[in-house]
Amino acid sequence: MPSATSDTARPPAAGDAGPALLPVKVVVAGGFGVGKTTLVGTVSEIAPLRTEAAMTALSVGVDDTSQVSGKTTTTVALDFGRARLNDRLVLYIFGTPGQDRFWFMWDDLVEGAVGAIVLVDTRRLADSFGPLEYFEKKGSPFVVAVNEFAGAHDYSDEELREALGLGADVPLLRGDVRDRASAKAMLVELAQHALRRRRAVPAP
Amino acid sequence: MTRPFALVGGRTRASVPLSLETLVTTAGEVPARAGTSPETLALLRLCSAPRSVAEVSALLHLPLAVARVLVSDAVHAGLVRTTDADVDPDLFLEEVLDAFRNF
């Protein structure tokens, strides 16, 4: 759920013309090198930006700093883009950090999002298992988009669904993340899916 | 060069809930009063057009947690206001779908 609007100290009307602009958030997930940042760039009307989230945490999992006792600070880079959709809406599209161990950042990312596009490279299907599992558990709407790399094996939809363990209700599409029409199709499919899910009777 | 966390007194938790995409807009005139930090002034200039918290962080070169505290403090001081998409989710999604179809 999106957090509440804080309209503290609403200013005088001067310079406050028109309806408020609302943010729309979409998350792009998938394995390392699958094209997340490329998709962000295709959708964005500005050069993609990067924000650094400094995470201070007790050692997370096993990594190079695990021999250091106590707190460690990890910097997680998030790439994102922006696209003005119309008078009222502005889209922010965020790429998830590449490594699964930054799951703690994902909650922050996914909160309030329309949903996620999980990108899949058919040469490295297993790389998408982590993201798929995350969104399934979280109950967030997501679509799966195969980024069609030249030379990649062409699996049928049935083969892919089985290999990825996708439910019949999860949209599966194919495209090229460099192509705007492909990116648009992914966004439309995601919004349709999110809307269908909201309207459906919740599963028991 | 000031250490980023010194700007916000070492605090890393904003007191206003701010998502990455929460839009921040400068509320009216930028104050000329003394004591407004350079970072706050930069924030107010940046947000003369709505900017997300993520953009504030990226464009002011501040870690996300620091940007959040800066924005949160500015909200409390009445210098900026924030907007989230907290409208009816069904209507909002329909609007989003429509916008994506015209993308």
Image (cartoon, helix red, strand yellow):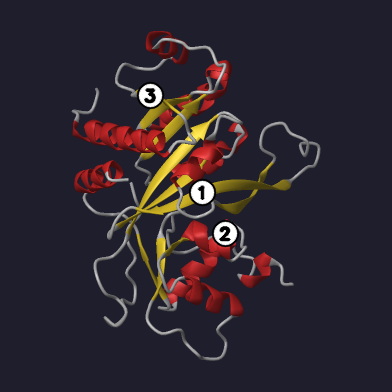
In-image side of A202 versus A44 (left or right): left
The residue identified by callout 2 is B58
| Spatial CA span between label 2 and label 1 | 10 Å
Residues tagged by mark 2 and mark 1 found on one chain of the structure: no
Residue A192 horizontal/vertical position (percent):
26, 34
Amino acid under disc 3: Leu
Q: Residues within 10 Å of mark 1 (few under 14, many from 20)?
A: many
Question: Mark 3 or mark 2, which is nearer to you?
Answer: 3
Amino acid under disc 2: Ala
Instruction: Please tell me the numbered disc located at residue A80.
Output: 1
The answer to whether the residues at label 3 and label 1 have Cβ atoms under 8 Å apart is no
Q: Residues within 10 Å of mark 3 (few under 14, many from 20)?
A: some
The answer to whether residue B18 is seen in the rendering is yes
Residue B18 horizontal/vertical position (percent):
44, 58
Residue ID at (49%, 39%): A39
Give SS at disc 2: helix
The answer to whether the residues at label 3 and label 2 have Cβ atoms under 8 Å apart is no
Q: Is residue B87 above or below residue B77?
A: above
The answer to whether the residues at label 2 and label 1 have Cβ atoms under 8 Å apart is yes
The front one of A33 and A5 is A33
The front one of A21 and B53 is A21
The residue identified by callout 3 is A173
Q: Is residue A134 above or below residue A115?
A: above
Which quadrant holds residue A151? top right
| Spatial CA span between label 3 and label 1 | 22 Å
Give SS at disc 1: strand
Residue ID at (56%, 91%): B34
The front one of B11 and A91 is A91
Quadrant containing the N terminus of chain B in the rendered view? bottom right
The front one of A54 and A152 is A152
Q: Earlier in the sequence, mark 3 or mark 1?
A: 1
